[in-house]
Image: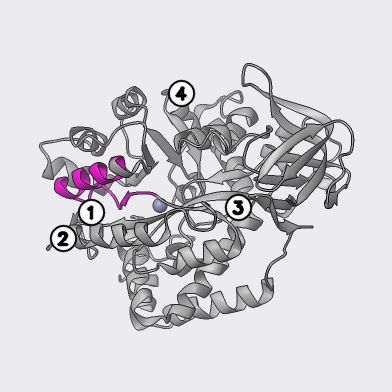
């Protein structure tokens, strides 16, 4: 069994009560796919990483990301571009262009985009990612397995894959793809669940409340619970969604709609919830559901998605990158700042809370007590930050440095299942420049389409 020893000037641990504690000058020893020990003396190991000023953390969990759809929008959707009256681009840019991309790109091109996304996720410090994507991009699984990421693939289910927002913003669709999508999901589950020595898993992923009808949502929940897989969806992500659900289902809010169908439960991870009422959040807290907070993708549109608002309602709240900028450290920094500005308080969304949100709380949401902690027996998933950079010195508190001052450029090392994927900030198992070039070229084939050009002009 191969062994790896990593020296941390600071090592994130937990005391007997489960509270965070930062140990000083310790070695973390990985043995095979598990953490074997945390020691004060240097252990012997096949591979030794002994550099000063490193902060060794459990591998970070980024449980909401989209490698594909946001690549298609990248730098096309800032500064109000591509938006009608500052409305959401989900139904005008992200969904239609991803759908078209699946049709025109080759398998090798889709794989190239997936690899580019996963490279960014790893360099952003994540070791576990939950990724909802269209079931026509199964190459996400191939790329995750090949590149060594711990991956919860979440192929979408839609009552229709062709939902369109009218000029009023209300989402309408015809037809029903639900049964076909559930069959496709089942086939992907049979093909991929447990692959890569268990690193590849699936989550059930009905796309959103306004694109999934009651029959499909009930069927998704039943199947997910039969298989004991997490359920993830988009919830209350726009005002148009709230209006749509209210009109369709007797005045219900999106959260009430999911509760009515039995989905609001501890196995549900709900992205965004920015258009939730306070009562919705109280209901989610009572049901034990989880909010996936992705503050930067909303900040881009001038909308507040404050971690503190969800957390203060008692809802388990995690941080994800939503594909926009796959820098999990940058995202927790944004979560802190946006929460403090929104509440007018400096003592909310603390470093300790936000570190929990990408470690132990995230692991609990997917019922993985072996992740998100550095302790003997846990999975050997590690994220290491280099705190010797000038902007992180002088250093008093490594956790505050991580949240307030660090960014993805400070990710020094990432290991998943005991395998070192990133060292010295570089991906070790492939040519970064070649991955970037191939992924970019594939996305530019979509950008060149007339319908993409129209969508980017706000005519989608
Ligand atoms: Zn999303």
Measuring from the top left, give residue 355's x and y in whole percent: 62, 34
Q: Nearer the viewer, residue 181 or 162?
A: 181
Q: In the picture provided, is 165 more to the left or to the right than 302?
A: left
Distance from label 2 to label 4 (Cα)?
Answer: 36 Å
- Earlier sequence position, callout 2 versus callout 4: 2
- Earlier sequence position, callout 1 versus callout 4: 1
- Residue for badge 2: 173
Measuring from the top left, give residue 430's x and y in whole percent: 67, 71
Q: Secondary structure at mark 2?
A: loop
Q: Secondary structure at mark 4?
A: helix
In the picture, the disc for residue 371 is none
Measuring from the top left, give residue 221's x and y in whole percent: 26, 42
Rendered residue at 36%/57% (across/down):
189
- Residue for badge 4: 312
Rendered residue at 30%/70% (across/down):
460
Distance from label 2 to label 3 (Cα)?
Answer: 34 Å
Q: Nearer the viewer, residue 332 or 428?
A: 428
Q: Is residue 75 visible?
A: no
Q: Nearer the viewer, residue 400 or 40?
A: 40
Residue sticking out furthest to the front = 1
- Residue for badge 3: 327
- Earlier sequence position, callout 3 versus callout 1: 1
Dot 1 surroundings within 10 Å: few (below 14), some, or many (20 or more)?
A: many
- Residue for badge 1: 211
- Earlier sequence position, callout 1 versus callout 2: 2
Circle 1/circle 2 CB separation < 8 Å = yes
- Write the start and end of the magenta stretch as one range: 203-225
């Amino acid at each position: 069994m191969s062994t790896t020893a990593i020296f941390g000037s600071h090592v994130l641990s937990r005391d007997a009560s489960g509270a965070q504690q930062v140990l000083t000058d310790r070695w973390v020893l990985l043995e095979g796919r598990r953490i074997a020990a945390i020691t004060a003396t240097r252990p012997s190991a096949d591979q030794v990483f002994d550099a000063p000023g490193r902060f060794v953390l459990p591998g970070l969990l980024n449980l909401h990301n989209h490698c594909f759809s946001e690549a298609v929008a990248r730098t096309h959707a800032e500064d109000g571009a591509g938006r009608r009256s500052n409305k959401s681009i989900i139904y005008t840019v992200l969904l239609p262009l991803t759908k078209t991309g699946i049709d025109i790109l080759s398998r090798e091109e889709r794989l190239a985009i997936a690899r580019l996304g996963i490279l960014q996720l790893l360099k952003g410090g994540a070791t576990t990612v939950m990724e909802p994507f269209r079931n026509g991009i199964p190459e996400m699984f191939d790329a995750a397995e090949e590149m060594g990421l711990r991956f919860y693939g979440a192929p979408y289910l839609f009552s229709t894959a062709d939902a369109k927002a009218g000029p009023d913003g209300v989402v309408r669709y015809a037809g029903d793809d639900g049964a076909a999508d559930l069959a496709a999901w089942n086939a992907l589950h049979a093909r991929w669940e447990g692959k890569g020595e268990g690193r590849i898993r699936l989550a059930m992923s009905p796309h959103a409340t306004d694109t999934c009808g009651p029959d499909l949502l009930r069927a998704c929940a039943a199947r997910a619970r039969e298989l004991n897989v997490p359920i993830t969806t988009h919830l209350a992500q726009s005002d148009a969604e709230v209006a749509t659900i209210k009109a369709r289902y007797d005045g219900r809010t999106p959260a009430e709609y999911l509760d009515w169908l039995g989905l609001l439960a501890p196995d549900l991870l709900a992205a965004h919830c920015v258009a939730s009422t306070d009562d919705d959040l109280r209901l989610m807290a009572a049901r034990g559901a989880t909010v996936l907070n992705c503050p930067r993708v909303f900040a881009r549109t001038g909308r507040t998605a404050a971690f503190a608002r969800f957390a203060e309602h008692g809802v388990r709240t995690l941080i994800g990158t939503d594909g926009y900028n796959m820098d999990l450290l940058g995202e927790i920094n944004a979560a802190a700042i946006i929460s403090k500005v929104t509440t007018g308080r400096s003592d909310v969304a603390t470093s300790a809370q936000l570190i929990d949100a990408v470690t132990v709380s995230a692991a609990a949401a997917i019922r993985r007590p072996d992740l998100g902690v550095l302790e003997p027996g846990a999975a050997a998933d590690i994220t290491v930050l280099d705190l010797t950079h000038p902007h992180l010195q002088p250093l008093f508190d490594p956790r505050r440095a991580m949240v307030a001052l660090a960014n993805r450029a400070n990710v020094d090392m990432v290991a998943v299942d005991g395998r070192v994927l990133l060292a010295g900030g570089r991906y070790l198992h492939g040519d970064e420049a070649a991955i970037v070039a191939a992924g970019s070229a594939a996305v530019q084939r979509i950008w060149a389409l007339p319908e993409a050009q129209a969508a980017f002009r706000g005519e989608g």
